[in-house]
Each structure stands twice: as structure tokens, then as C-alpha cells.
Image: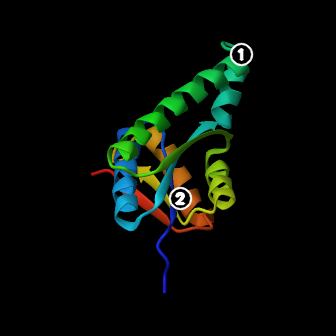
């Protein structure tokens, strides 16, 4: 018999699709009695690019990106609190896919929820690559929430 997840990890990035996925994960968690953790990842590659351009010091860029991710996780946490679902917020820096996988393993999560967007753009192509890598390498089940 398949056990329902007691802990759900949700990747958030500030996009409308990620917030929809967060809302979906919270509804699911409320139905099955799970807790939710919202994870925002500061992309190490983006930090390297900023550093190479020399416009902003890496530490300042990282602090700004961390604040932005914290805002995203807080926005998702408001959804959970409104629905009475226990939640945590985590902001980490690293390779997006590896950081999500590491967090899932270390935290003992039973389900990963991520969003994919309906727009076609270079950003979506990159996000699609992240989604594909997560599907390929995640050690736990993944729910890919497609924005419609």
C-alpha cells in the first residue's frame, strides 16, 4: 500500500505558476494532513554571472536575491496559514536542481511539488530544463503543476 506523504516540499520562485502550485499543494496537504515546506533557491549560476559582469558585488547580489526568495516563501506561507496548514520556509543558495534534491533527501519529504509555466520564452526553456532534471533525478515522487 502506498503511503500518503506527511511532508510536502514546494519549490517557489515568485512566478504566478509557482503560487498556483503552492496553493494546490496546500489544498492537498489540508486534505491528507501533511505539512508543507516552501523552498526558494538563489541560483548560484546567476550569482556567478552577476559577479563576472562586475556591476554589483557578489555578497550584495546574494543578499538581494535571498530577500527576494524570502518574500516569495512568505507569500506562499500566507496561503498555508489562511488554510490552517502547518508550513516552514527555507531559502538556500546553490544549483537549483541539486539544492531541491538535497533538501528533499535531508528533510525526509514524501512529495515534491513544482510548477511549470505555459509561456514560451528563454526563461521557460531554462525552467523546463530544471523540471526535466528534477523528474529524472528526484528520489521522491514529483507532482508537476502545469499552469493552464
Position of 50 with respect to 29 (left or right) is: right
| Percent x, y of residue 124 | 44, 43
Q: Most extreme residue toward the left, as rendered?
A: 148
Position of 48 with respect to 125 (left or right) is: right
Is residue 148 visible to the viewer in this orientation of the structure? yes
Task: Give the labeled residue for mark 1.
Answer: 57
- Identified at 49% across, 81% down, the residue is 2
- Identified at 72% across, 20% down, the residue is 59
Q: In the image, is residue 97 above or below residue 123? A: below
Q: Most extreme residue toward the bottom, as rendered?
A: 1
Instruction: Kindly identify which numbered label has been placed on residue 22.
Output: none
Label 2: which secondary element: helix
Position of 16 with respect to 91 (left or right) is: left
| Percent x, y of residue 145 | 38, 56
Instruction: Kindly identify which numbered label has been placed on residue 132.
Output: 2
- Identified at 71% across, 16% down, the residue is 57
Q: CA distance from mark 1 to mark 2?
A: 32 Å
Label 1: which secondary element: loop
Position of 9 with respect to 146 (left or right) is: right
Closer to us: 57 or 41 = 41
Colouring scheme, one of rainbow, by chain, secondary structure, one colour: rainbow
Q: Residues within 10 Å of mark 2 (few under 14, many from 20)?
A: few
Is residue 17 visible to the viewer in this orientation of the structure? no
Q: In the image, is residue 90 above or below residue 10? A: above
- Identified at 33% across, 49% down, the residue is 83
**In this rendering, which labeled residue sits more in front, label 1 or label 2?**
1
Q: In the image, is residue 58 above or below residue 3? A: above
* Of callouts 1 and 2, the N-terminal one: 1
| Percent x, y of residue 48 | 71, 29
Asked if the residues shown at circle 1 and circle 2 are in contact, with their CB atoms under 8 angstroms apart, the answer is: no
The mark tally for this picture is: 2
Amino acid at each position: 500500500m502506498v503511503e500518503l506523504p506527511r511532508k510536502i516540499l514546494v519549490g517557489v520562485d515568485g512566478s504566478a505558476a509557482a503560487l498556483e502550485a503552492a496553493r494546490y499543494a496546500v489544498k492537498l496537504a489540508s486534505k491528507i494532513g501533511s505539512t508543507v515546506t516552501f523552498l526558494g533557491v538563489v541560483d548560484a549560476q546567476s550569482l556567478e554571472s552577476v559577479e563576472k559582469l562586475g556591476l554589483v558585488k557578489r555578497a550584495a547580489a546574494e543578499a538581494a536575491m535571498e530577500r527576494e526568495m524570502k518574500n516569495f516563501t512568505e507569500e506562499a506561507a500566507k496561503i498555508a496559514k489562511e488554510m490552517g496548514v502547518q508550513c516552514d520556509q527555507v531559502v538556500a543558495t546553490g544549483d537549483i536542481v541539486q539544492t531541491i534534491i538535497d533538501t528533499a533527501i535531508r528533510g525526509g519529504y514524501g512529495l515534491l511539488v513544482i510548477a511549470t509555466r505555459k509561456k514560451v520564452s528563454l526563461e521557460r526553456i531554462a525552467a523546463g530544463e530544471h523540471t526535466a532534471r528534477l523528474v529524472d533525478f528526484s528520489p521522491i515522487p514529483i507532482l508537476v503543476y502545469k499552469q493552464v
